Amino acid sequence: MKIGCIGCGNMGGGVLKGLVPHGEYQLFGHDHSRSKVEALDAEGRRVAWAESPLALAEAADVIILAVKPYQVEAMLEEIRPALDSSKVVLSLAAAVSQEKLMQGAGGLCPVVRAMPNLPVIVGKGVFALCFDDASLAGSRKAELLGVFQKLGMAVVLPERLFPAFTSLVGCGPAFVFLFMEGLLNAGITMGLKASESRELVAAMVEGSAKLALESGESFADLRVKVCSPAGTTIRGVNHLERNAVPGHVADAVLEALKRDMEMAGK
Ligand SMILES: NC(=O)c1ccc[n+]([C@@H]2O[C@H](COP(=O)([O-])OP(=O)(O)OC[C@H]3O[C@@H](n4cnc5c(N)ncnc54)[C@H](OP(=O)(O)O)[C@@H]3O)[C@@H](O)[C@H]2O)c1
């Protein structure tokens, strides 16, 4: 499969970089800055530089759009001469609907709306994909899902759940990093060096996430396992509960959802 990415910043760069070790794909990249494409592949052999968005669309079977949402429409117009039913346009842009993608592609090829998150940069992305059912065969959908499963976790979701996925999983890393900043500061306050505190917090969060994934237990049951009777953790947990932190976290996601709706013009 020939996969090209227009826009090789955080998301597009993360996707291409994650696919470099998978020799079955032929990769192409285009960005305003050629150095961003060249930096994706230290040996410089696996990601071919495309001179323009149109040249990339001509060379690739799967054209990934990883530019900002407001740039998607113009980009589709630019690559339209290269589109036909053998191609697939896959957009990573937040709040750009499948209908808009289909219009932008002029109905010339199938479109896929996908939503990534930042950990794709380290091969631990979580993706949602929504397919254009009418024009994509089941085998092609499975192939595309397989590409994103190589970059972390990928699920198929109906488009009506994209705003929820975006607010929870797309924005989620920022909420987790904010929580981690609080923990980091606590470590420094108690006398740890900033670098030590940072390493310890990141490893602790990674371990907690791994435990949650592998055990399959509810988050509440796992939390109770850390809270010994009359112990230290329950004092901290009570403080967070008194300050309604879980409710505030849920509200942060719902605020992001409101903004996603605004951006989609709803
Ligand atoms: N970041 C996230 O956590 C996240 C999460 C979910 C979804 N997304 C979606 O992913 C998409 C990309 O976001 P990002 O964070 O990867 O943005 P980014 O880091 O700014 O990357 C976009 C890249 O595209 C380049 N570009 C823009 N227009 C171009 C053009 N006409 N020709 C060539 N290159 C062009 C930009 O170059 P210049 O900087 O020089 O313009 C930049 O290098 C967005 O649509 C966003 O909604 C992002």
Image: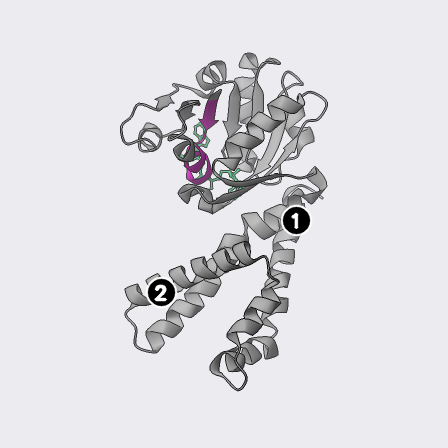
Q: Is mark 1 within 8 Å of ligand 1?
A: no
Q: Secondary structure at mark 2?
A: helix
Q: Position of residue 223 (x, y in %)?
A: 55, 70
Instruction: Report the amino acid beneath label 2.
Output: Leu
The residue sitting at 55% across, 84% down in the picture is 229
Circle 2 Cα neighbour tier, 10 Å, few/some/many (<14 / 14–19 / ≥20): some
Q: Which residue: 56% across, 37% down?
A: 93
Identify which residue, 125 or 49, lies in the foreground: 125
- Which label's residue is closer to the chain start, 2 or 1? 1
Residue 140 colored in magenta in the image = no
Q: Residue furthest bottom?
A: 230
Considering every residue shown, the one lying at the far front of the view is 215
Q: Residue at x 62, y 40 (%)?
A: 95
Q: Residue at x 36, y 22 (%)?
A: 49
Residue 250 rendering spot, x and y as whole percentages: 63, 62
Q: Where residue 65 sits in the image (x, y, percent)? A: 52, 29
Could you say which is closer to the camera, residue 138 or residue 198? 138
- Looking at the picture, how far across and down is residue 197, in whole percent? 33, 67
Q: Is residue 176 visible?
A: yes
Q: Which residues are magenta?
A: 3-15
- How far is mark 2 from mark 1, CA to CA? 31 Å
Count of picture labels: 2
Q: Is residue 249 above or below residue 156?
A: below
In the picture provided, is 255 more to the left or to the right than 160?
Answer: left
Find disc 1 in the rendering and name its residue: 164
Task: Write down the quadrant of residue 91 in the picture.
Answer: top right
Inspect the image, locate mark 1, and give the three-letter code of the amino acid beneath it.
Ala
Visible in this render: residue 104? no
Q: Quadrant of residue 92?
A: top right
Mark 2 and mark 1 residues within 8 Å of each other at the beta carbon: no
Quarter of the figure with the C terminus: top right
Which residue is under mark 2? 200
